[in-house]
Image (tube, rainbow, N blue to C red):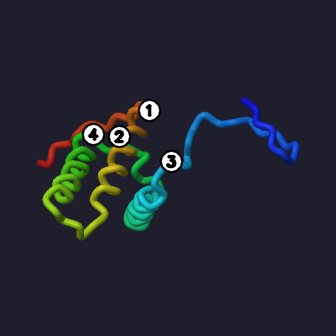
Amino acid sequence: MKKTYSSGATRDSIDVRWDLLCTEFTRAMAVVLHEGAKKYSDENWKKGMPVGVVLNHLEEHLHRWKTGDRSEPHLAKVAVGAMFLDWYERNKIVVEEEDDD
């Protein structure tokens, strides 16, 4: 759908409402990803990790937040873990669990 402005300019509308996102939260996610990139390399996570490993870290951060720990951005880390899982699913990335032996 096109919108015409009072200036006469027209623009197609988009079907996504980016303005509804919480910018502070998405920034917190970006900070988490930046820290990970410094530690492991840019987009290292896109290579894939076992789902169980990602879920374990996600659940640990959720547990810490639920028990009142505010020493880290735990909810941003939960969201980043969910983003990893979504990426793996969308891109059909499967990494098998390895034994710790």
Look at discs 2 and 4 and give the one toward the viewer: 2
Residue at which label 4 appears: 51
**Label 4 amino acid?**
Val
Q: Which residue is drawn at 21% across and 52% down?
A: 62
Q: Which residue is drawn at 33% across and 48% down?
A: 81
Query: Residue 86: where, in percent of width, then height?
Result: 39, 38
Quadrant that contains the N terminus? top right
Residue at which label 1 appears: 90
Earlier sequence position, callout 1 versus callout 2 = 2
Q: Is the Cβ of the residue at disc 1 closer than 8 Å to that at disc 4?
A: no
- Distance, label 4 to label 3, CA atoms, is 29 Å
Residue at which label 2 appears: 85
Q: Is the Cβ of the residue at disc 3 closer than 8 Å to that at disc 2?
A: no
Is residue 82 visible from the viewing direction of this image?
yes
How packed mark 4 is, by other alpha carbons closer than 10 Å (few <14, some 14-19, many 20 or more), is: some
How packed mark 1 is, by other alpha carbons closer than 10 Å (few <14, some 14-19, many 20 or more), is: few
**Label 2 amino acid?**
Leu
Earlier sequence position, callout 1 versus callout 4 = 4
**Label 3 amino acid?**
Leu
- Distance, label 3 to label 2, CA atoms, is 23 Å
Earlier sequence position, callout 1 versus callout 3 = 3
In the foreground, 14 or 82: 14
Q: Is the Cβ of the residue at disc 2 closer than 8 Å to that at disc 4?
A: yes
Residue at which label 3 appears: 20
